[in-house]
């Protein structure tokens, strides 16, 4: 008996008991749909983390002011500004592992444009900030080195600020006022979305550092050289731990810290934090897929159970086939094809249910999902393997029946 004849006989046997065949496939359908949906949800979460990593910048350190001691009392982190823009320039100049180092000074206030206004935050930054944070310009231009010496009255704004002040109009060339200081918008930042903490990264205005310090933030800041943080981008291929040690040693030398004395700054490795979160997301995806796979195993057990029942019901038929010349391997192939057919049909129906369920969850729960051909192929392949694994024992049992005893079976 050839394979096509086995498939034809198997399909005819399945059509005889349509309801039982459908109920048997139900476990496989639910299992495949669950695997596809869980992997789509997990992959979507992982992709979201990857986007957040890219939005912050790759190979990135953030240097913040650390704790200081006063009268023997160690104050909290950031209690006194200890890092300066000169530190940033020194890191850029003297640390071979560093590609870009950008100081930033943070402020906030009401921004006015014509009859519109919006409360937001602004950062005084150097031109290296765009490279360090991998932040491109959608329209217009970025801040340039020529904007720094004369404290040019220019600004680059985020998408959220642009929409609230100018609607859908192009903001480039328009004027905004911060603390009554007029600034010409020279560029619009590309959209970055939310940060890890859920903050809108596009709700921001970037100014030249000298402009923020000397014109916008007032006389209290104009005589200082301290900054809120320094963004440091490490060159590709450089070990992050070695780069951190290099930066730490340079800053300790500049701040004249003695051996054994605590750092008066803090280096935060954002890549490590985000990579750890990405790994957690990957593990969660695998866990969800493993849990969903239990449904496939349950479906496989259902197939074995039904196939055993089918072998018992068709014992006389098996004996008759053997009596007219069917070999043991023909009987084995017949029942094995039935089991695999049940699994594959259930797997194909499970694909439609899984894809539909994934899009439904993404739509109603506003959860990002990403379907992949690999996940679908894995689910269907697994369902076929379950058909072979759980169908082999009933098929083998049928093939080993003795023709005389099978014909005499009541």
Image (cartoon, rainbow, N blue to C red):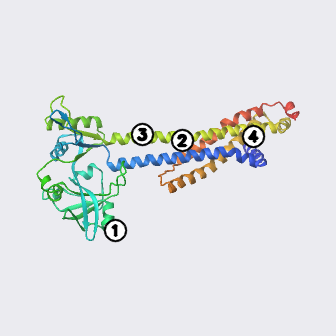
The residue mark sitting in front, 3 or 1, is 1
Name the residue carrying label 3.
279
- Would residue 288 be found to the left or right of residue 2 on screen? left
The residue mark sitting in front, 2 or 4, is 2
Q: Is mark 3 on a helix, strand or loop?
A: helix
Q: Residues within 10 Å of mark 2 (few under 14, many from 20)?
A: many
Using the image as rendered, state which of residue 221 and residue 401 is in the foreground.
Answer: 221
Using the image as rendered, state which of residue 45 and residue 199 is in the foreground.
Answer: 199
Name the residue carrying label 1.
167
Name the residue carrying label 4.
334
* Between discs 2 and 4, the one toward the N terminus: 2
Using the image as rendered, state which of residue 36 and residue 183 is in the foreground.
Answer: 183
Q: How crowded is mark 1: few (under 14 residues within 10 Å), some or many (20 or more)?
A: few
Where residue 176 sits: x, y (%)?
A: 23, 65
Above or below, 16 relative to 320: below
- Would residue 344 be found to the left or right of residue 63 on screen? right
Where residue 3 sits: x, y (%)?
A: 72, 42
Quadrant position of the C terminus in the picture? top right
- Would residue 48 be found to the left or right of residue 241 on screen? right
Q: Which residue is drawn at 75% across and 34% down?
A: 329
One can see residue 267 in this view = yes
Above or below, 352 relative to 237: below
* Disc 2/disc 3 C-alpha distance (Å): 15 Å
Name the residue carrying label 2.
289
One can see residue 239 in this view = no
Where residue 231 sits: x, y (%)?
A: 25, 46
* Disc 2/disc 4 C-alpha distance (Å): 32 Å
* Disc 3/disc 1 C-alpha distance (Å): 39 Å
- Would residue 409 be found to the left or right of residue 387 on screen? right
* Between discs 1 and 2, the one toward the N terminus: 1
């Amino acid at each position: 008996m050839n394979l096509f004849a086995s498939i034809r006989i198997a399909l005819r046997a399945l059509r005889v008991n349509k309801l039982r065949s459908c109920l048997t496939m139900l476990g496989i359908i639910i299992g495949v749909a669950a695997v596809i949906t869980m992997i789509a949800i997990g992959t979507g979460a992982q992709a979201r983390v990857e986007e957040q990593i890219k939005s912050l910048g790759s190979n990135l350190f953030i240097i913040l002011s650390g704790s200081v001691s006063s009268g023997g009392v160690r104050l909290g982190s950031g209690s006194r500004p200890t890092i300066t823009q000169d530190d940033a320039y020194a890191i850029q100049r003297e640390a071979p592992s560093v590609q870009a180092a950008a100081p930033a000074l943070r402020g906030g206030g009401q921004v006015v444009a014509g009859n519109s206004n919006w409360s937001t935050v602004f950062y005084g930054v150097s031109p290296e900030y765009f490279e360090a944070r991998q932040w491109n310009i959608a329209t217009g231009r970025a801040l340039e080195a020529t904007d720094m010496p004369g404290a040019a009255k220019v600004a680059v704004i985020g998408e959220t600020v642009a929409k609230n002040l100018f609607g859908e109009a192009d903001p480039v060339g328009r004027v905004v006022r911060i603390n009554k200081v007029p600034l010409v918008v020279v560029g619009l930042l590309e959209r970055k979305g939310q940060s890890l903490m859920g903050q809108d990264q596009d709700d921001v205005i970037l100014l030249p550092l000298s402009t923020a310090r000397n014109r916008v933030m007032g006389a209290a800041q104009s005589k200082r050289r301290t900054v809120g943080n320094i963004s440091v981008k490490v060159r590709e291929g450089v070990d992050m731990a070695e780069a951190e040690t290099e930066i730490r040693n340079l800053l300790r030398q500049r701040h004249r810290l003695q051996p054994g004395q605590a750092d008066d700054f803090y280096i935060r490795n954002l890549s490590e934090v985000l990579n750890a979160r990405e790994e957690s997301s990957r593990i969660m995806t695998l866990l969800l897929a493993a849990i969903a796979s239990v449904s496939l195993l349950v479906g496989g057990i259902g197939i074995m159970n039904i196939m055993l029942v089918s072998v018992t019901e068709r014992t006389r038929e098996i004996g008759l086939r053997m009596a007219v010349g069917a070999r043991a391997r023909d009987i084995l192939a017949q029942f094995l094809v039935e089991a695999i057919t049940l699994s594959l049909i259930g797997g194909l129906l499970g694909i439609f249910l899984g894809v539909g369920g994934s899009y439904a969850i993404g739509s109603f729960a506003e959860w990002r999902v990403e379907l992949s051909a690999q996940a679908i192929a894995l689910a269907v392949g697994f369902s076929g393997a379950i058909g072979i694994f759980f169908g082999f024992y009933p098929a083998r049992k049928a093939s080993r029946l003795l023709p005389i005893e099978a014909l005499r079976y009541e």
